Amino acid sequence: MITEEQVLEALKGVEDPEIHRSLVDLDMIRNIVIDGDKVSLEVVLTIQGCPLKSTIGQDVENALKALGVKEVDVTFGSMTDEERSALATKLQGGKSQVSLNPQKGSPLLAADSKTKFIAVTSGKGGVGKSTVSVNLAVALARMGNKVGLIDADIYGFSVPDMMGIEEQPKVIDKLILPVERFGVKVISMGFFVPDNSPVVWRGPLLGRMLKTFFEEVYWGDLDFMILDLPPGTGDMALDVHNTIPQSKEIIVTTPHATAAFVAARAGTLAIKTNHEIIGVVENMSFYECESGEKAYIFGKDGGKKLSEELKTELLTQIPIGAPDYQETDEFAPSIYPQGSKIGEIYQQLARKVIEKA
């Protein structure tokens, strides 16, 4: 006869799809009743009306049927405020988890952190910096890496829309769970501003938001953290440089001489703050006609000249082109599908980043 211990052991492999920890470890499995080859149990959700309830129930049923259970009856409850607070404390106290104590800071920023930070920046807006950020993050995740993405462009946040994210982050007690899309954990100012309202904060409040993104968000274990920085060399860019001294940087430009000239300022800021520039990405490099001929709409060689000026590598040149989606693809406005021509360029960029990080 199946025992309660066997049931719990089988369910250790079932994770909460947002926290990515075992339901057993999170104490979400309650009231197990075994009647011959039938098992009934309750799954206590972190929040009432969890949209992933059906996924969790199916995973529980599959795990128990693999154990040999013939009939599985799963009911759902939700944690009390006290239980959510206890869970948040448990998550904060675990290895490589977030601490809300500002005296301790985020373990992601600790000296022994294994997370590699890649800041994507530009000298001016409109060069496709955020497009590069989101597609690089997705490309790294497609290669099996655990990836986080912070939309640090507080005034010009665009990442949620670009990635097709419509849901909001969940909150357990005071702990924020980032939204996951295409295997990337995402946090953005866009999640906290109603109706696309403008942000009119000044420097100190912006710095506090960056601190919140690190210290009050449950990131878990990450291999890479991509930071989509605001263009230029303003307060937020300076805060990132000071907060993450171990971050490496990618400078994004277009081939246009003026864009490359302005991008050099962002590169100079990185150098002055002792941040390593791992390379330049030239976006909107050309338009490839049906004949295969390349039309250099915005000029030519701006990225090459910038990389030479900054004494770094031109990592890639990305052509102009909207994502080409098939009916079977998971749609997002700015994410290039895996296997597409530009999607493969981003995969190659991700491989270079892994080598240089």
Image (spheres, grey):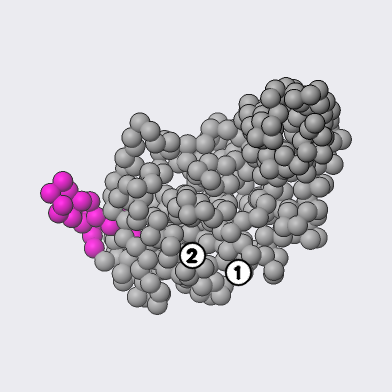
Looking at this rendering, what residue extends furthest in the left direction? Answer: 291
Of 106 and 198, the residue lying toward us: 106
Of 178 and 23, the residue lying toward us: 23
Q: In the figure, 176 relative to 230: above or below?
A: above
The percent coordinates of residue 49 (x first, y second) are: 69, 24
For disc 2, the neighbor class at 10 Å (few under 14, some 14 to 19, many from 20) is few
Q: Which residue position holds label 1? A: 246
The percent coordinates of residue 161 (x first, y second) are: 48, 38
Magenta range is: 282-300
- Secondary structure of the magenta portion, mostly? loop
Looking at this rendering, what residue extends furthest in the front direction? Answer: 1
Give the residue displayed 39% in from the left and 36% down from the top: 329
Query: In the rendered structure, which disc, 2 or 1, sits on the residue that comes first in sequence?
Result: 1
Check disc 1 and give the amino acid type: Gln
Q: Which residue position holds label 2? A: 354
- Alpha-carbon span between mark 2 and mark 1: 15 Å
Quadrant, the N terminus = top right
The percent coordinates of residue 201 (x first, y second) are: 62, 47
